[in-house]
Image (tube, rainbow, N blue to C red):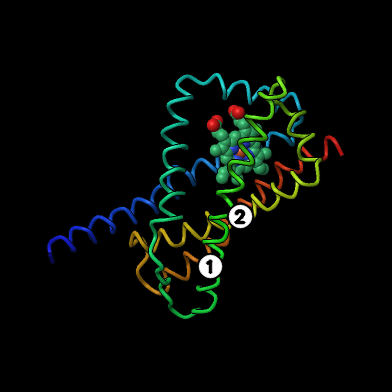
Amino acid sequence: MENCQSLYSKKSFWLGKLFSLAGVVPLGLYVIVHLYQNLRSLSGAEAFDQHLAESRSFPLIVPITILVIWIPIVFHGLYGLFGIKKTRANLMQFPYFENLKYTIQRLSGIGLLIFIPAHIYKTRIEPTLSQSSLNFHHMSEALNEPLTLGVYLLGVLGVAFHLANGFWQFSIGWGLVRTERGMRRMQFISYGVFVALLTLGYGAIWGFYRAHA
Ligand code: HEM
């Protein structure tokens, strides 16, 4: 019985580690590259459309997308929704602030599970249904609809928080920082990640928005 229990907790320990790794390494890197690439919107329609065509014609794009995006998103999303136990953050000296961040982490995760399908609808399904193609003009029109603009502003805010705070949790969970000083430093780095992601995402939205406004 004891062996069974320790096997179970070992399994959930490693699943938890994998959950955190999947959120930061493939998904985190993908989001940074994705937002950065969408900054092309600031260079105008031609530059953006050319970049989109190039990235779509990249060899092996389909298996890479499945491996780097879809498998980690499904695993991280499902585990985050159903598998994670109600744990408490490692409270050092900002217990209320840590608890607040922990709650926002969960809320932003749920928000992303709504934002991502809405985003896939806008970028993939809607152009197919209307027999048009996804390009700068499509994104620019979409981001001038108040509802879509609101969803994207909140979605980028959610992803910036979720990833920056997830990075901080990952660094503790994986033992990258152990001392109080190291943790405080890592917390400041995570604030920087939050601001950098917001800047990239809102910059990209602004590039599409202003072209049509
Ligand atoms: C400024 C905000 C964003 C803009 C302007 C944007 C734009 C785009 C565009 C144009 C595509 C289509 C690419 C293609 O068909 O080749 C796309 C796909 C996608 N985006 Fe975003 N995106 C934004 C934010 C996000 C965020 C925050 C996430 C993730 C959490 C995300 C996840 C995805 C995913 C998973 C796909 C589908 C990838 C695929 O199957 O090829 N995006 N996005």
Q: Amino acid at mark 2?
A: Gly
Say whether residue 100 is left or right of residue 23.
right
| Location of residue 74 with respect to 139 vertically, above or below | below
Q: Which element type, helix, strand or loop, lies under badge 2?
A: helix
- The quadrant of the rendering that contains the N terminus is bottom left
Contact flag, marks 1 and 2 (Cβ < 8 Å): no
Question: Residue 115 in the image: x percent, y percent?
Answer: 61, 47
Above or below, 134 against 38 in this view is above
Quadrant housing residue 127: top right
Q: Nearer the viewer, residue 156 or 81?
A: 81
Residue bearing the label numbered 1: 103
Q: Secondary structure at mark 1?
A: helix
Residue 30 locus on image (x, y percent): 51, 40
Q: Which of 163 and 85 lies nearest the eye of the viewer?
A: 85
Q: Ligand 1 within 8 A of label 2's CB? A: yes
Amino acid type at mark 1: Thr
Label 1 CA crowd tier, 10 Å (few <14, some 14–19, many 20+)? few
Q: How many marks?
A: 2
Left or right of 91? Residue 7 is left
Can residue 169 be seen here? The reply is: yes
Residue corresponding to mark 2: 158
Report how far apart the C-alphas of labels 1 and 2 lie in the structure.
12 Å
Q: Residue at x 61, y 52 (%)?
A: 196
Question: Residue at image x 83%, y 35%?
Answer: 211
